[in-house]
Amino acid sequence: MLPKIFFGYFAVVMVVLSLLIVTRKNPVHSVLWMLALFFHIAGLYLFLNAEFLAAVQVILYAGAILVLFLFVVMMLNLKEEVMGERFGKEWPVGISIGAFILVLFFFTINKFSQGPTGQYTIERIKAETHTKAIGSVLYTEFLLPFEIASLILLIAIVGAIVLAKKTK
Amino acid sequence: MNSADFIALLPLIVPALASVVLLLLITFSRSHAVSVLFTLGSLLLSFLLLFVAGGGTPRRVTPLFIMDAYSLFFIGLLFIAGIVVAVMSSRYLGERSMERGEYYVLLLLATLGASVLAAGSHFASFFAGLEILSVSLYTLIAYRRNDDRGNEAGLKYLILAAASSSFLLFGMALVYAQTGSMDFFQLAEGGRVPDLTVVLSAGLLLITVGVGFKLAVVPFHLWTPDVYEGAPAPVAAFIATSSKGAIFALLMRYFSLMDLQRFPAVWYGIAGIAVASMLIGNLLALRQNNLKRILAYSSIAHMGYLLVAVLAGGTVAKTAVGYYLAAYFATMLGAFGVIAFLSGEEGDAENLEAYRGMAWSRPWTAGVFVAMLLSLAGIPLTAGFIGKFYVVAAGAGAALWIPLIVLVAGSTIGLYYYLRIVAVLYGRVPEGEGGAVTGFPGRVLGMTGGILLTVLTFALLWLGVYPAPLIRILQATVARLVP
Amino acid sequence: MVPLEWYIGLSTVLFVIGVVGFLIRRNILIMLMSIELMLNSVNISLVAFSHYLQDLRGQVLVFFIITVAAAEAAIGLAILISLFRNKEAVHTDEMTEMKG
């Protein structure tokens, strides 16, 4: 029963927070609600025995990506934003597409059947520690995409510098 | 990984290393020629290494990559496209004051991403390859950063591509949950994939949405004309060819391993997409006066034709896809090549009216352009005709009558706007003081332009007149896709 | 134990909120945030699946998704700054350079 109450708390808070993110007028408020959301997601990861990812979520998402967003929001200095129209003209279309996807998914969800399980049981991860277990998968089977991920970050650095540089 | 794995992966390792070395190189020398030559050299080296890697095939390097004849063929095609785009860009960038070295770093990495897709056999390599390709394209599209259209196009592409990747990932997550595996080959194993579960179909449909965006098929095509117009002409050529071809190669592998015919919801979804792309792509092209936008709509229609072959499935269809893509690459690169080499510093040569009467002042350039347009339209004696013929044969073999009728109808509409461009090229030059200057007087193609366009035209005609050698290669490689 | 369906439900709801936010907002910054929301909902479902499947590959994919999200945010914001410098525009309906 207790896990279900925990999950219920996380689920309700996360849905409310994401609704706040997409509806606030001031982008700064959205970013701050997003910060709260990311901490809750990290909490949910802990709940799912993924400590390493919880730490990465806090450090990378809350620590790096959101700071970047906040930085740009401040830099663009959107004073008139609070006055302007919040939603585009086609908002009923957007909401109906969303409702359609939602209905479609709730019809499929009860047909769900789980695939065959693998070898990383909770006990094994607990014995090995999560960081070590995920490292042993990441640096063997997934070594090559790991290298590619580093190249993606290189592109991000090169691209951001080339694009945001002031012209002489 | 042992040394044999390493040798098999060399064609992918070389461009990755080359991009890092080039980045170091431009800190010492910002010479444009050095960057161009280094890029061309490393792409050529990677291309030659394909033959070295071919010795040990087929070989699975970790579950993520498969180096077999199929992937080597497409990687080769992608490297050739990369070389052609690099040559186009050398002229294009040489005439403009932009950061030059970084452009080639991004181009190398984009080519690497496309090759990773062609060799991918796992959701992780699919995602990694797709993202390295997209993230470098975001920057390349917005590369003319003082141009509002470039920035707008880059941002549009980024926002829509990022949203479509999250659809793709959601689909992957659902397939993973249902099967407990991300490996394409494991998915193909008997019994692993439960037949016809609703969730699996939903996952595959979401993957189709994500992929459909990258292929720019209707109804996910809205970004295409704007991005082609805003991007520099060589980058537009890259998006039209490499980015789409690589995803097509992966899609073909994935769907033939999964056996698409077993999922009617997905099959009909793709059929609808194919029919809509062929019709709407061709119809929307009729109203355009901007050459880049016409080519954008034309590429939408061409992806629709190719999807007909995917729907058909089977050996003939795979040969058809390989041949069609080779022909499409040569044609699109040639068409964008003409635009890129005619583009001056004031903007890309994209306005159709500027081409009026060009055939009289520069007959050779106009002739090349006409050859490319006729191949896009699928006129006999060009590569496009043989490609389309093969697709129709594959479709007829699988009795796909409705898509085939639409294909023929779409090609007929297409003929109209391709011939309209030809008519403008051979049109009468407006007389008198009021007439605008047309036909790009004073613009020289240069040696690189001349050689590149001549080679592409010869490739086009050779593929159209004597297709047997390529078909033999394809039958030996592409058709043996499923182990 | 919490049933796996609950996690799928939660991540679907978050995903749909992200999609709707992406479709209806005019401000590009909020659209980028909606995309982050969509990616996070996928992450939640992947972590949950990999927990229930007793398989770590889902979590490794989450690791890559976080990397890519960072790269996309960096480039997206760089283009946005470049666009804002030229045009002072951050809304979708102000992007009207190309028509047809």
Image (tube, coloured by chain):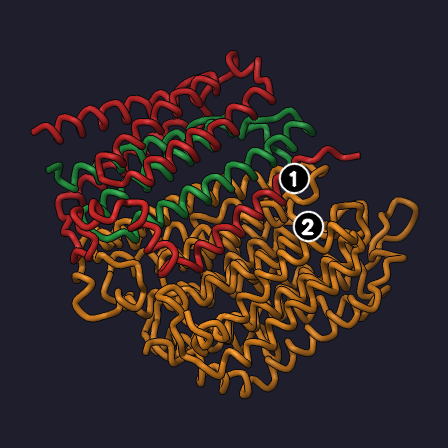
Residue at 56 percent across and 39 percent down: it is C75
Percent of width and height locating residue A52 = 33, 40
Give the amino acid type for the residue marked by disc 2 in the picture: Glu
**How far is mark 1 from mark 2, CA to CA?**
10 Å
- Residue situated in front as seen by the camera: C59 or B283: C59
Residue at 59 percent across and 86 percent down: it is B466
- Assess disc 1: are there few (<14), some (14-19) or many (≥20) residues with their C-alpha within 10 Å of its C-alpha: some
Discs 1 and 2 share one subunit: no
- Assess disc 2: are there few (<14), some (14-19) or many (≥20) residues with their C-alpha within 10 Å of its C-alpha: many
Chain ID, orange in image: B
Location of the C terminus of chain B by quadrant is: bottom left
Furthest-front residue in view? A127
To which residue does mark 2 refer? B102
- Residue situated in front as seen by the camera: B310 or B176: B176
**Which disc is residue A161 wearing?**
1
**Going by the image, does A77 lie left or right of A26?**
right
Q: Chain of mark 1?
A: A
Percent of width and height locating residue B238 = 60, 58
Q: Colour of chain C?
A: green
Asked if A111 appears above or below B385 in the picture, the reply is above
The quarter holding residue B110 reads: bottom right
Percent of width and height locating residue C39 = 38, 39
Q: Colour of chain A?
A: red
Do callouts 1 and 2 mark residues in contact (Cβ within 8 Å)?
yes
